[in-house]
Image (cartoon, grey):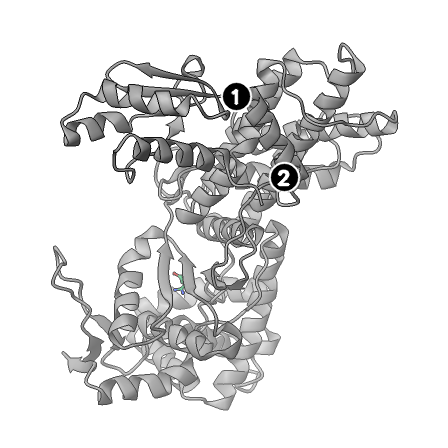
Amino acid sequence: MVDSVMGRVDDLLRQAFAAAGLPTEAVRSVPASKPEFGDFQCNAAMALGKAAKRNPRDIAAAVAEILRASPEFAAVDVAGPGFLNLRLADAFVTARARAQAASPDLGIVRRDDPPVLIDFGGPNVAKPLHVGHLRSLVIGEALSRIFAAQGVAVTTDIHLGDWGLQMGMLIAAIRRAHPERAPGTVGEAVTVDEMQRLYPEASAACKAEPERMAEARALTAALQSGDPQAFADWSALRATSLADQRHDIDRLGTRFDLFLGESDAQAIVDTLVPNLVARGLAYESDGALVIDVAEGSDAKPLPPLILAKSDGAATYGTTDLATIAGRATDPALARCGRYVYVVDERQSLHFNQVFRAARRCGIAPGVDLVHVGFGTVNGVDGKPYRTREGGVARLRDLLAEAVDKARGRIETDDPAIDRDVLAEQVGLAAVKWADLSTLRLSGYSFNLDRMMSFEGNTGPYIQYACVRIGAIGAKADAAGLRPSAIALGHPAERALAMACLRLPVAVAAATAGYAPNEIADLAFAVAQAFSRFYAECPVLNAEDEEARAARLALCGLAHAVLSKALWMLGIAVPQRM
Ligand code: ARG
């Protein structure tokens, strides 16, 4: 294990502040705002000076004096009212870069967290995946890999929306469309296309005609109470729909361990709800069954969680609560320390209510429940993305468009490159990068032309940087040239090593904030540092054998770091491009 450079700097800073007789809780470094200030700066002397009624410059000077004795630093300067500017010694950076290159985990610190369950995707059955599913599928997969990269066991569950009124509507509609078939044998006769056509029709008809709605409700109730024919039709529809959705999920490279859904919570609902009523936690209010979740500290009290509507049908909240109860008693998930829900931020009230209800009812007591929300994918108009015709954009069409666009941009005439494979890798990289490099809670506009550019902060640019570094190594290999140990002479070499050394910090930040953009930022910094290095420092044509071997070693580290970062983001690295 290699602890991070920033961690070491902070340790040294804290020791120095302590030695100068000052508290250390607020002491930390930040990357220098300008290269001429060195590598890191620390602003703690100002706040501490105020509290201790001492001149911050004197504090900074005393701390600097102590730090100068550490071989880790080449220069420690006091600037302005009491800023500390720190420049690391080249020998220290070199040693750290060598250690990182030799570490199988590239210095990423292993966490001993209990296993994590990630609930994401969550598509409703009977509908194709649409643009709204993109973020959950991409962010959920990235988070699962970020945890895995630190040695944390992860279980992923898609939590299909497969149990509500929409299923009753659909079953009723297909039975109407196939009067020649007996109930229970209709589902198996329906194709995806037919289902996807019938569903919106059925939903509109139920809104317009009370009888259709009554029929749908009756079928939903029949399904939820175990009617064998309703169940048979439902199972067939679910299987057909899921097979179709899996096509897009697999194409995205998203992997689920569990394909459970709301339906799997029914058995738990049946025992949980009466139990909550018996314990007085759930009570009747205006004909509905509710749990209070308001807390004294609420600025605006949270409305109660509705467990059952007046018609007795279980709700979205009930199934989520029961699912938590089910997970907590599932022996395969018994050791999980947290359940993470990667779902649109617009559902934050729902999760807040469900999590509070779980706490109040003593469900999954030792488990952290976390909603990881995200902003919407928007059109260029800044409103949630729609097709040109104004409809909901299918994920499949969006991905196809991205891949087509990528194919059009491939300029290579290298016969060893399979253009279809490459177009797929580049198109998906463009889409995933645009999503993952944005702050999770911000929306972003889906602009394929911009995402697909080979310049700037884009997936294809990062992929290309990674492939280019890999090609240098491969060329050297073929010519029998071996890397030696990393040595840092040129400033561009040092800057590249410093960028690589940020990996463990980026992974820790990505984990703490459920923020894949931290990994994207790191990858972009490494790619940029590499571009500069490559322009200023010849590798294969280096001035001498020694410089070449050391640069090959540095290229090896940069390639490993970029590959790891792209892996965590679920972005493929093409063999050549
Ligand atoms: N099916 C839900 C929807 O379409 C999303 C499910 C999210 N996951 C969950 N455990 N509630 O809105």
Residue 219 in sight here = no
User: 22 or 210: nearer the eye?
Assistant: 22
Kindly identify which residue carries mark 1. 89
Report the side of 192 relative to 313 (left or right): right
Q: Quadrant of ligand 1?
A: bottom left
Determine crowd level at label 1: few under 14, some 14-19, many 20+ residues with C-alpha closer than 10 A.
some
Q: Position of residue 183 (x, y in %)?
A: 52, 86
Q: Secondary structure at mark 1?
A: loop
Q: Residue 531 — which label?
A: none
Q: Is residue 88 above or below residue 198?
A: above
Q: Is residue 11 above or below residue 478?
A: below
- Report which quarter residue 97 is drawn in: top right
Kindly identify which residue carries mark 2. 403
Residue type at the position of mark 1? Ala
Q: Nearer the viewer, mark 1 or mark 2?
A: 1
Residue type at the position of mark 2? Val
